Amino acid sequence: MRKKLVLYFLLVVFLAGVAPSCRINYSFTGANISPAVKTYSVYYFPNRARLVNPTLSQSFTEALREKLQRQTSLNELAEDGDLIFEGQVTGYEVRPMSIQKDDMAALNRLTVTVRVKYTNNIDPDQSLEQTFSAYEDFDSTSSLSDVEDGLVPDIITKLTEDIFNATLANW
């Protein structure tokens, strides 16, 4: 009886794999991109935040480009790609978190906010305009200038992952 079940299972699996109308596409990057899409463009994200990190705009723009290069097979164009990413850094702020006795903060939180306009010229229904935020906490005994170089790359990684998931992974 067990052999019959195994043979039946193998037969079903084989027939499902052979059937021309049954096709499943797998992507190990998580991207869900139409085959008609061939190119993308990432425009520079200017920093419009009140508190300005002088390298943030360039670092974020480059990180988004690199994320798309690594996780898609699309070609990058300087402008007018099938997919267009544009926007601006709208927030860069430090706030106290985890207040302890004597109204002193035990932790501070650096938050970066980016407004993204994603235009899909092949399927305009996929286009979106959304704000993304990411943060990292740091000990209040450290100044922002002491920890900034270590925190900002982590925040940028979180932001680019969220943007990728919202636009190309359709999460």
Image: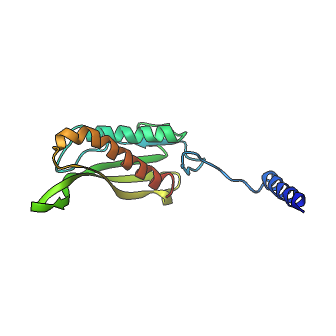
> How was this image coloured?
rainbow
The total of numbered circles placed on residues is 0
Could you tell me residue 10's position as x and y percent?
83, 54
Q: Residue at x 20, y 52 (%)?
A: 93
Quadrant in which the N terminus is drawn: bottom right
* Near-viewer residue (81 or 141): 141
Could you tell me residue 112's position as x and y percent?
27, 50
163 vs 45, left or right, is: right
Q: Residue at x 17, y 48 (%)?
A: 51
* Near-viewer residue (130 or 91): 91
- Whether residue 65 appears in this view of the structure is yes
Using the image, determine if residue 99 lies above or below residue 114: below
- Whether residue 79 appears in this view of the structure is no
Q: Name the outermost residue toward the left.
A: 102
44 vs 119, left or right, is: left
Using the image, determine if residue 91 lies above or below residue 103: above
Could you tell me residue 7's position as x and y percent?
87, 56
Q: Residue at x 33, y 50 (%)?
A: 87
* Near-viewer residue (13 or 79): 13
Q: Residue at x 49, y 38 (%)?
A: 70
Q: Name the outermost residue toward the front.
A: 101
* Near-viewer residue (45 or 149): 149
Could you tell me residue 48's position as x and y percent?
22, 49
